Amino acid sequence: MIARLAWLELRQQLGGRVFWIVFAVSVLMVTGAMAIDELRVGLPRSGALTGAAAIVRTHQVWSLFFLFTAAAMVGEAVLRDRTSGFAELVGATPVNPRAYALGRFAGATGALLLCFLSVPAALAAGGVLLGAGPGSAAAYVLGWGALAMPNLLLSAALFFALALATRSMAGCLIGAAAVLTLYGLAGESGPEWAALADPFGFAAVAQVTSGWSAARLDAAAPPFVGVVLANRVFWLGVAIALLGLAVWLAGRGGRPTRRPAPAAILVNRSDAASEQPRLLRSAAPWRVTLRQILWQARFESARIIRTPVFAVLLLLGLANAVAAAARVTGTPATVEALTRSFQLVPVVVVLFFAGELFWAESEHRVAPLIAATPARASVPVLAKLAALALILVSLAVASGAAGAATEVIQGGTPSAVAYLSWYVLPRWYDWLLLGVLALFLQSLAANKIAGWGYMVFYLIGSLALNRLGWQDPHYRYGSYPGAPLPPALSGAPGVGWYRLGWGLVALAMVVLACRRPRRPV
């Protein structure tokens, strides 16, 4: 039964957009990194393109990049019935919940491993096209079989357990962001126990190949003995333990939990529903629309801010920002450190919560009821934009306050006006432009996952343009001279005109999103 369920899940994944989009992006980026030196993120910039060291390192780096892919595939497989409304039907069948969860996991993990084949395929094809040859077969065996595959199995088991524990995609995404953030704080050198503790094997390979010449690194793959073998065995054991924990959670949870009925959700809106007729009778149309927008924005923003997801993201970002601010003294230096360090959290908040906000009514099956009310079609979009703006301004205020508090602890005297004009307002405006783009892309998408994919493509494209040096603010959405620093710190002229221009572009996207008809999930 598990094998059949795994086969059905594998077919489901192979027929989905995520698999083929990630496969295509991986091929393009791996081959692009071979041709363009600026795109070699985390990869060696010297040595043969298809030397053993380059092949092994590429497999390791991309197994780290595939964290979010593993979270999306495995999390979606575990939560598909719950989000699609078929959980009750599945729960009514005699299928064992543990076997059912294992089948889903096996199929999604198989799809993940097949998707990762894009990396060695792109390496070999790129090497042939660029005249460097496909490279050593032993390096591919070590890179994919001994390094990348255990890393992918570990990621899949971790997100399998997180999805079952949290019953939400947010748990998987937060787990991926946390692992990536914490892993970025660790180095690749240290004692032997540190090499064993590295879950992705970078430190173990670095220790084994320490002292090797460039020619030897290109000619021979690291030996699969000693600390490398111990590292792989240890973390495969961790993956098995996580899988066992997930299976226990699946059995303990029993049948899938019933989704709240639309009536239960509407209870939270009962006060607005009872108030609406009075508003329509006593207020002018524009005042009715404004009150609807403000009420829904308050409801949506409060719902998001109270979630553990937002709290975890904020704490991770503040920890990083405070660590950066503690290394400098003075308000200008602290503001610059905050600006440069507190960038990942707003992007993740915009990426994730724009989809959550835009598709909330459709996922809770109240969109037809809301469409039947006399509210204007633009009210939901404007309310969600206002909610996202409130969430982002709370991030700006919290991070600015953390920077000011750090300055006070160090004996300084921060200026509230400086923090407000140099950091809080400029950063909030920049993040809001990104939020408008995220909501606009969600309005173009057929579902939430596709909207997230569009935004990820935009972010990847921005990173690639940065690596290529194409940073002219005339064609980079939301950019301006001296970005991300405010003109008071960068000294760049004409920043206000660029901000005004991109603000008008964002306004046009808001108008288009309001005019676009909503589609159910």
Image (tube, rainbow, N blue to C red):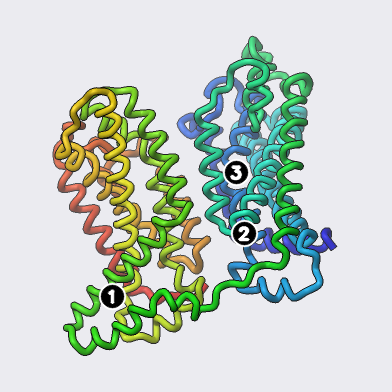
Query: Residue 376, percent across and down?
Result: 30, 80
Q: Is residue 24 left or right of residue 298?
A: right
For the residues labelled 3 and 1, say whether their Cβ atoms are less than 8 Å apart: no
Q: Who's the residue at 80% across and 60% down the image?
A: 99
Mark 1 belongs to which amino acid?
Gln
Question: CA gap, disc 2 to disc 1?
Answer: 33 Å
Query: Residue 519, percent across and down?
Result: 46, 75
**In the structure shown, which secondary structural element does the residue marked by tag 2 occupy?**
helix
Nearest to the observer: residue 379 or residue 321:
321
Q: Earlier in the sequence, mark 2 or mark 3?
A: 3
For the residues labelled 2 and 3, say whether their Cβ atoms are less than 8 Å apart: no
Mark 3 belongs to which amino acid?
Phe
**In the structure shown, which secondary structural element does the residue marked by tag 3 occupy?**
loop
Q: Which residue is mark 2?
A: 76
| Disc marking residue 292 | 1
Say if residue 508 shows up in the picture.
yes
Quick check: 392 above or below 471? below
Q: Earlier in the sequence, mark 2 or mark 1?
A: 2
Q: Quadrant of the N terminus?
A: bottom right
- Disc 1 crowd, CA 10 A, few/some/many (<14, 14-19, 20+): many
Q: Which residue is mark 3?
A: 66
Camera-side mark, 3 or 1 = 1
Question: CA gap, disc 2 to disc 3?
Answer: 15 Å
Q: Earlier in the sequence, mark 3 or mark 1?
A: 3
Nearest to the observer: residue 391 or residue 103:
391
Mark 2 belongs to which amino acid?
Glu
